[in-house]
Amino acid sequence: MAMSGLGGVIAGAVGKQIVSKLGEYAASEVSLQWRYREEVLELGEKMKDVEAVLGDADERSRRQGRQGGRVYERWLAKFKRVAYDVEDVLDELDANELISKTQSKVSFWFSRHNQLLQRVTMPHKMKKVMNKIDKIKEEGSSELNLVPREARGQGNRNNETFAANWNGDGIKTGMAGRVIEKEKIISLLLTSEEADRNISIIPVVGLGGIGKTTLVESVLADKRVNVFDVSVWVHVSKQFDLSKIGRAILKSLNSNINNLSDCTMQFLSDNLTKELATRRYLIVLDDLCEEDGNNLEELKMLQHGRKGSRIIVTTRNQSVVQCLRTGFLANQWKICPIPESEVINLDVLNPDDCWELMKQRAFGPGDDQSSLEEIGKQIAGKCGGLPLVANALGQVMSERKNVGAWEDIRDTKVDLGLRDQKETLERLMLSYYHMEPEFKMCFTYLATFPKGFVMHRNRLIQQWNALGYINSRHDGQRCINYLLGMSFLRIPGSTSVNPSPLHFKAPTELVMHDLVHDLASIIVLDEFIDLDATKSASWNKARYCRHAQLTNFKNDPEVFKYIPGKLRSLQFRDLGGRQLPKKAFSRSKYIRVLDLSGHSANGQSAPSSVVLPSSINQLKLIRYLDATCLPITSLPKYFHALQNMETLILSNCFLETLPDSICRLTKLCYLDLSGSSGLGKLLASLGELSQLFFLNLSGCSILQQLPESICELTCLHHLDMSDCCALQKLPDKFGGLLKLSFLNLSGCSKLTKLPDNVSFPCLEHLNLSSCHELENLPIDFGHLQKLEFMNLSGCYKVPLLPVSFCNLII
């Protein structure tokens, strides 16, 4: 059988998500408007009936190939669109009820959400979506003869733990069949003969997914290479951006250099010359694709390191290595590749090594492998010798440890009808096809980020939650661990050969493998669009897209007329110094995620102040808003109408005050005000944000005190007040934050004491570094039984620790 299209895998994921949501609504008598309860129950039953035959439609589309399966692909596409429409109606119903509860009767009556209007329009919307479901249900049973089909091989799943194969330093530990290559690289880095030469380049060449990055990460994790003064990792990928490379290296060499986003190449060159001159460095340029010799010649900015410095280049193309052998640097023996005979050329793994990798993922210490080993070896033969595929399939197999499920994986064939990287992507597609259903939507959403984009874990989880893909932060971390285990996500390369000993349970930064990004992009081909503002006339094809990124915005308000009306997420990648028109979002009422943080791209300078457009108040379904670095001085009037808002990121904005109405956002659970250097006071009503679990106030440099009401935030888990250098005291009842697990007060240089009776029974991470005026620690601090990390460096006035600290094991 061959897969004719991808309608089944994405439609199935959407269907499961909506059916689950309908079940939650039907079970909730509190949040659901009673007059629509019967309709929602009926919707749920109809959606279950249709969702039950998705497997049959997908099976038939795959079996009949790209030609015969098109009729089933079209039906699956129709189902997916209807499922999204159902969710929109449900969310709108919920939003209307929330608004009606929070607004006064007078303001609500005159608002566009008044009850009379809703009583007229909502039944019509419910009826319309019911008719759509009936229509595709009838088409599926009468015309296509679809029948319910149960999914195979779902047994022995462990939904509580998805262990990703990474350690505390962010370096993968799973590797097989590369011992010789690893030792060869280490030898090239350390031999005395090589050390006497000038700077040399060590190329590691091989197919995408063959394990180049993992191999080099294992080299950097080896203690034998600690001889270098500094080690820097730069992910290059397809776009060779010399400025980006230079900034990444310089930032790693000297973290005190600020404002690198707008610096010139001359500034970079001068400072790199200064920083490298006295150091023997090891720099990794990961996934270098540039084949233009003139561009590669610009790497001469790295020629000033001490003798014995090394540059490791991972690349898919031998032509890149050949280009590095020509030009001034090579001819002058400033920087040049090692002899051609020494180049590390990675070949595919043999099936036995692939099986070793898969076993690391698939089996636990006490698992009986006897009944599955032969099938596992057969699946290993489908990996094409690529570790990336072996890791992904091994993780999938670990969740379905029974003969039927593994036979299903072995027997599934995929035909994407592609040209570029066809076989590799089809092998990866096999692992996606059998991925845990609840994580499929989370994974495909990653295609909305550019290749090589470094994603922040917390913000990614908040976006997934805003889109309804997960139900909790715990689910989000489970998904990240699962995708790490598949190697679909990875931790960016280490920037230090001596990693920081700081304790953390999970990586804060994540990136996708380029090939995995290609796979996600194929799956969401009709779900996501890259909207180039200079080509808006060609956007008609985006009618049914649910996710978009907007690039090259040139301050043309006409652009927003073309934005698809059904968008769920919109991310600006280079807003630059532009102002958004007042009606920018008047056509985008279904947006759940709005990210305006990409405005600083391409070195464009932002205006002195920006006003968020008033049309943002019409986004009544919005749950996530990121305005990082946007110079906004105030929030729009009636901003509190956004009652579904859960995540609000106003980092490095120009806010001087917060409106009282922000505390009426009753669902707000994630608030980031970091870098608000003009914010001198917090709202006295802050305690009304009863759902708040994350609060970041770091860098609020003129904030002198916290309101007493902060002690009423009973759900608060994470509080960061680092570099609040004007903060003089904490509220007396501060110790009453019983759920607090992360507290950072580093750099609070005027803080003289901590409140007494500080219990913090859940506290795990405590940073008091550089609290120069802190005179003592509360006696109760010795009873922080869950404390795993504490930093007291720079607390010069703190005397010996209280006796009670003897109870702690840190």
Image (spheres, rainbow, N blue to C red):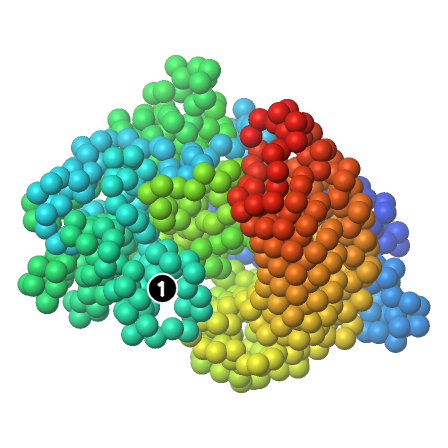
Which quadrant holds residue 454?
Answer: bottom left
Q: Residue at x 36, y 29 (%)?
A: 358
The answer to which of 341 and 536 lies nearer the viewer is 341
Q: Which residue is mark 1?
A: 247
Q: Is residue 176 left or right of residue 47?
A: left
The answer to which of 768 and 139 lies nearer the viewer is 768
Q: Residue at x 50, y 62 (%)?
A: 528
Q: Is residue 53 left or right of residue 393?
A: right
Q: Position of residue 289 (x, y in %)?
A: 25, 59
Which quadrant holds residue 365?
Answer: top left
Which quadrant holds residue 420?
Answer: bottom left
Q: Is residue 63 left or right of residue 788?
A: left
Q: Residue at x 74, y 38 (%)?
A: 758
The answer to which of 206 and 658 lies nearer the viewer is 658
Label 1 sits on what residue type? Arg
Q: Position of residue 339 (x, y in %)?
A: 7, 49
